[in-house]
Image: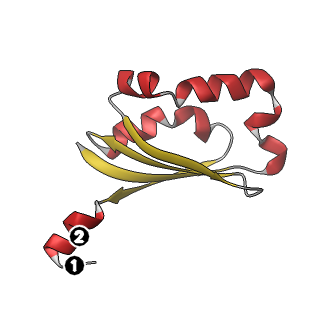
Amino acid sequence: MKLFVVRHQHEAARCPARNPEMGVMLLQHLSAANAEKHGIRIHGEGVLDGQHTLFLILEAEDDAAVRQYMAPFAQAGTVDVWPASPCETVVTRREC
């Protein structure tokens, strides 16, 4: 399993949280149990207040699995996926 950092952004006018049903659906999609069904482990998530920007730290087999999992978010805005490493791994490799 590999580590990834994901950023989802959307315009305020397209915010899924404005629609109660859509908000509930996205929260269910982000649940640990649902993520596991997609072969994803969520290490952390957070939304930047007032920025309509969600960050996730995910573990998955590859970026294709992450992109497939993030497909519902891509309907509302952009999804960026970056490969990442735990800090301990970077320090051990002595590279940044």
- In the image, residue 88 lies at what x, y percent? 23, 65
Q: Within 10 Å of the Cα at label 1, are there few (<14), some (14-19), or many (20+) other Cα atoms?
A: few
Indicate whether 24 appears above or below 89.
above
- Horizontal side, residue 61 vs residue 92: left or right: right
Q: What amino acid type is highlighted by mark number 1?
A: Glu
Vertical arrangement, residue 1 with respect to residue 24, above or below: below
Tell me the SS state at disc 1: loop
Q: Nearer the viewer, residue 61 or 54?
A: 54
Q: Position of residue 56 (x, y in %)?
A: 49, 48
41 to the left or right of 18 = left
Q: Is residue 55 left or right of residue 91?
A: right
Residue 44's tag is none
Give me the C-alpha separation between circle 1 and circle 2.
6 Å
Q: Residue at x 17, y 79 (%)?
A: 94
Quadrant the N terminus occupies: top left
Residue 90: which quarter of the image? bottom left
Q: Residue furthest front?
A: 88
Residue ID for mark 2: 90
User: Extreme left residue here?
Assistant: 93
Which SS class for mark 2? helix
Looking at the picture, the colour scheme in use is: secondary structure
Report whether 69 appears left or right of 78: left
Residue type (three-letter) at the residue carrying disc 2: Val
Residue placed at 61% from the left, 29% from the top? 27
Residue in the image at 33% along x and 59% along y: 84
Q: Mark 1 or 2 closer to N-term?
A: 2
Q: In which image quadrant can residue 13 be found?
A: top right
Position of the C terminus, as image quadrant, is bottom left
Q: Mark 1 sits on what residue?
A: 95
Is 93 rendered above or below residue 75?
A: below
Question: Image point 37% across, 21% down: which residue?
Answer: 37
Mark 1 in CB contact with mark 2 (< 8 angstroms)? yes
